[in-house]
Image: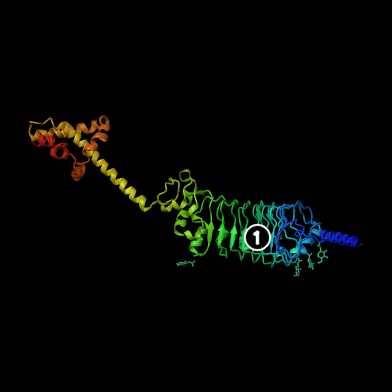
Amino acid sequence: MYILIEIFIITNLIIDQVITANVCSSGQCKCSTDFTLINCDTKGWRNLDDVDFPVNVVTLTLINNNLKFNTITDLAKIENLSNLINLSINQNPLGTIPPFNHTQLRFLSLQDTSLTSAEFPSSYNNSHLQAISLSNNKIHSINEEDFLILRGSNLKKLHIDSSSISKIDQNAFIPLTQLQALSLKNNQLKSCEFLLSLQALSSIKLDENQFTSLPQQLTTPRNIKTYSFIHNSISIIDESSPLSRWLTMNYTNVKIFLANNPFNCCLSLWFIRFIKTSPQFVGDASVLTCTSPPIFAGKLLIKLNPDEMNCGSDIPSKSWWTTGRIISIVVGSVSMVIIMIILIIVYTRRYSSHSGYEPIGGNDELYSNLDTASLDEHTSTIPEDDDELLTNASIGSTRSIAPTDAPTHTTAEGVYAADGSLVGGSQIEEAALIQ
Ligand SMILES: *[C@@H]1O[C@H](CO)[C@@H](O)[C@H](O)[C@H]1NC(C)=O
Ligand SMILES: *[C@@H]1O[C@H](CO)[C@@H](O)[C@H](O)[C@H]1NC(C)=O
Ligand SMILES: *[C@@H]1O[C@H](CO)[C@@H](O)[C@H](O)[C@H]1NC(C)=O
Ligand SMILES: *[C@@H]1O[C@H](CO)[C@@H](O)[C@H](O)[C@H]1NC(C)=O
Ligand SMILES: *[C@@H]1O[C@H](CO)[C@@H](O)[C@H](O)[C@H]1NC(C)=O
């Protein structure tokens, strides 16, 4: 009799245990000892019919299952968890945002859940959501009504990365008056009119989109402190960019991140100066590199000197006449004049060394006359015959004499020849001429 009673009690206990067992007591899920943190990832669940969660759960993750939350029971399983504030159901085939009627939820993550729309159903009226992630979906466009039900909510953080978004209605974010951080990385956006309605926003991430220039919306003063445009298609930043306004409007505490954009450094000379003079505005200035033109490809912008960059004549730039360029032009011209003078000296030397020996033994008058005559002859013949000799050998040997003689010779016309001692190439020759 006692045995029968005991068996009855034991079987009763077992049955009771099975019926009331929650995911933690049955060992189905990973749970913290106080059951506030529960991880039921990768269980292959299609619904929650046979699942019970302990009511004290605060953070629940149901990642990588086959849940759809398209039945009242499944929705109620979540809605009954009155302490739940953090719910992640990433990697489930939801299709649409599940209509949880759970006003205590603060953090909701719906990444990679096959969402095709960002529209929040009416059950989110009066929700207390503070952070939402809708990343890794196929949302394509964000419409004016999508967040309407979240009007007056305390939503501060919204991530919709990698969701093939190419269009965002410019009024779409108006209901999100408290939004501080918006991330729209890895989409197909080309513009950001929607920025103007986000009064509380302090950070916007538009990395890996299709911006080809910095949008003018960056000019309007907002609370935005951080703009991120990493890995877009921005190739030119010049005076017309909003960054120029940041300077003139004396903005403070504003930063932009621009790594991995294909900068054309010759067309962005203004920007190169900007990051040198106002580095506080560009958070990643030290890693920005040029993509074109080819001579600057891969070069760090911060290491380039816009005044010394050879950007070719087709670059219209008011700043072409830089001090460096003016100096080199002046130096170049002076060198040309000096070379001309040297050439003239060499001509004359050659002439005098040819003719100089003839009058030896004759008188000075005869010598002078002959010189004058042969000078005319030589000047017309030498250029064709001895061009090479002049440029190579003679210049080298006369260079040391040239500076001291130069003043006299530049103004001399027929005088060279008469003044044999001056143009003489060697001491011996000179001595011979004087005698
Ligand atoms: C939710 O809780 C109510 C009572 O609080 C209960 O009657 C109902 O069965 C619960 N639903 C689910 C799906 O657990
Ligand atoms: C919510 O839960 C996820 C998964 O455990 C965790 O990564 C995240 O940090 C939690 N968020 C908050 C605000 O507690
Ligand atoms: C949400 O639940 C409350 C009760 O907790 C109920 O009054 C309200 O009608 C529900 N809203 C929706 C949209 O189901
Ligand atoms: C949202 O809830 C408020 C009451 O808090 C109600 O006045 C309003 O009509 C509701 N809006 C919708 C769209 O259900
Ligand atoms: C910016 O500051 C400069 C000098 O500090 C001042 O002259 C100029 O008026 C300021 N500009 C604006 C728009 O406040």
The amino acid on which the numbered mark 1 sits, given as a three-letter code, is Leu
Q: Quadrant of the C terminus?
A: top left
Would you say 105 lies left or right of 401 here? right
State the count of labels: 1
Would you say 304 lies left or right of 389 here? right
Query: Mark 1 packing: few (<14 Cα in 10 Å), some, or many (20+)?
Result: some
Q: Quadrant of the N terminus?
A: bottom right
Q: Residue most toward the right? A: 1
Kindly identify the residue that appears in the image at 13 percent across and 31 percent down: 357
Report x, y in % for residue 131: 66, 62
Compared with 382, 332 (above or below) is: below
| Depth check, front residue: 56 or 130 | 56
Provide the secondary structure element on which disc 1 rests. strand
Compared with 251, 408 (above or below) is: above
| Depth check, front residue: 427 or 333 | 427
> Circle 1 sits on which residue?
158
Protein image colouring: rainbow
Would you say 113 lies left or right of 2 here? left
| Depth check, front residue: 205 or 345 | 205
Q: Quadrant of residue 15?
A: bottom right
Query: Is ligand 2 within 8 Å of the beta carbon of the residue shown at mark 1?
Result: no
Q: Quadrant of ligand 2?
A: bottom right
Q: Quadrant of residue 178?
A: bottom right
Judge whether residue 61 can be spotted in this image.
Answer: no
Report x, y in % for residue 284: 51, 55
Q: Residue most toward the front? A: 2
Report x, y in % for residue 199: 61, 66
Kindly identify the residue that appears in the image at 47 percent across and 59 percent down: 279
Kindly identify the residue that appears in the image at 17 percent across and 31 percent down: 354
Report x, y in % for residue 124: 74, 64
| Depth check, front residue: 142 or 51 | 51
